[in-house]
Image: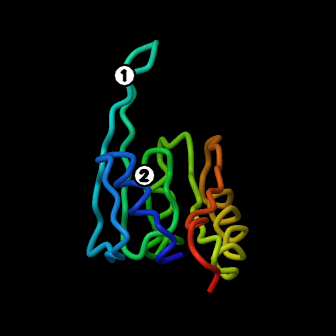
Amino acid sequence: MAAVGKSSIIKRLVKDFFTEEHVITPSAELESKTFELPRGPVRLDIWDTVPGGVITGLQVGQQNIHSMTKSYFRNSALAIIVFDVTRKPSFLAVSKWIETIRTNVTHDISILVVGNKADKEAE
């Protein structure tokens, strides 16, 4: 699922930065953010890979996802599947991503589905 806005979500979360300009992720990028919670700090590590696809609670990825899923989701507590609300094929791919996660992850993992680009016109 390319161009659904995963990198924009990550940049907003980690760096409080947003741009309307579409920038293709050139290679795998790791972003981290530490949250101060009452029980202590929790660090979120997020992998953003080309062409992107699934944000996991600790990592992100789609690049040949079928062969990489286990390593991307290792030790992750959460997977966030992002789709573009203006593009029906993007939404239709969500069930495939859920199946891919459930097939390849051997531990309990929560899955959150996020519709992005609600401020845009449908294509």
Task: Tell me, for residue 9, which label it has, or none.
Answer: none
Left or right of 6: which side holds 113? right
Q: Where is residue 82 drawn, in percent x and y?
A: 57, 62
Q: Quickly name the residue at label 1.
A: 41
> Residue 2, image x and y in percent?
48, 77
What x and y, as percent, mark residue 113? 65, 56
Residue 60, located in which quarter of the rendered image? bottom left
Left or right placement of residue 119 versus residue 34 in this view: right
Q: Which residue type carries mark 1?
A: Pro
* Alpha carbon separation for disc pair 2 and 1: 18 Å
Please rate how many residues cluster around mark 1, counting C-alpha atoms within 10 Å: few if below 14, some from 14 to 19, many from 20.
few
**Looking at the picture, how far across and down is residue 20, in whole percent?**
37, 70
Tell me the residue that label 2 is attached to.
Answer: 59
- Measuring 60% from the left and 53% from the top, which residue is drawn there? 105
* Quadrant of the image occupied by residue 122: bottom right
- Residue nearest the viewer, comparing 32 with 119: 119
Looking at the figure, which quarter contains the C terminus? bottom right
SS assignment at label 2:
loop
The disc, 2 or 1, on the residue closer to the chain's N-terminal end is 1
Instruction: Determine whether, in the image, residue 21 is placed left or right of residue 90.
Output: left
Q: Is residue 111 above or below residue 24?
A: above
Q: Residues within 10 Å of mark 2 (few under 14, many from 20)?
A: many
Comparing labels 2 and 1, the label whose residue is closer to the camera: 1
Residue that extends furthest to the top in the rendered view of this protein: 39
Q: Is residue 39 above or below residue 87?
A: above
Work out whether 89 lies above or below 50.
below
* Left or right, residue 67 beside residue 27: right
Q: How is the image coloured?
A: rainbow
Could you say which is closer to the camera, residue 11 or residue 100? 11
